[in-house]
Amino acid sequence: MSITNASEWLASHIATEYELDPRSTRFIEHYSEASYGDTSMPDTYDEVAFAWNGRKAHDPQWRRLQGEELAALQAIAAEEPGREI
C-alpha cells in the first residue's frame, strides 16, 4: 500500500501516537525525483487536509504547495536541526 493510499490511517495514527491536535497539525506529502524513479520529475509537496471524527481522519484533500508558501515551509524546516522539507 502506498503512503497516499494509507494517508487517513497514517494521519490518525500520528495524531494519536504523538498526542497532536489534528486541527492545528499540517500533514505534508513529499515526493522526490527518486520517488518517481525519474530524474526529470521535480519534487512535489502537497498539504493533505483531513476531516476529523474525534481522532480518526477521513476525506483527505490534497493541495499542491508552491511558490512563497513552499519557500516559507522550507525556511521553517531549515530552522529546526534534523528536519528537512
Image: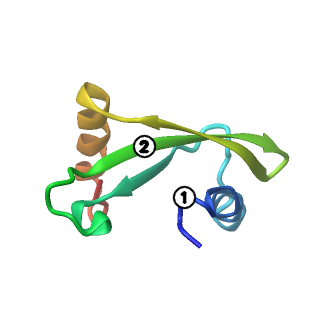
Q: Secondary structure at mark 1?
A: loop
Cα separation between marks 2 and 1: 11 Å
Dot 1 corresponds to which residue? 4
Residue 25 drawn at (x, y percent): 57, 44
Q: Number of numbered discs present?
A: 2
Q: What residue sits 85% from the left and 47% below the top? A: 54
Whichever of callouts 2 and 1 sits on the residue coming sooner in the sequence is: 1
In the orientation shown, which residue stands out farthest toward the top? 68
Looking at this view, name the residue that lies furthest to the left: 40
Q: Is residue 4 left or right of residue 69?
A: right
The label shown at residue 46 is 2
Q: Is residue 67 left or right of residue 28?
A: left
Name the mark nearer the viewer: 2 or 1: 1
Q: Secondary structure at mark 2?
A: strand
Question: In this picture, is 78 found above or below 34?
Answer: above
Q: Residue furthest bottom?
A: 1
Looking at the image, which residue is at 37% across and 55% down? 30
Nearest the viewer among 1 and 25 is: 1
Q: Please name the residue shown 75% across and 47% down the image.
A: 58
Q: Quadrant of the N terminus?
A: bottom right
Q: At label 2, which amino acid type do we have?
A: Asp
Residue occupying image coordinates x 68% and y 68%: 17
Residue 59, above or below 35: above
Residue 27 position in % (x across, y down): 52, 48
Do the numbered discs 2 and 1 sit on residues whose CB atoms are within 8 Å?
Answer: no
Q: Where does the image place residue 45, in percent across and percent down from the top left? A: 36, 46
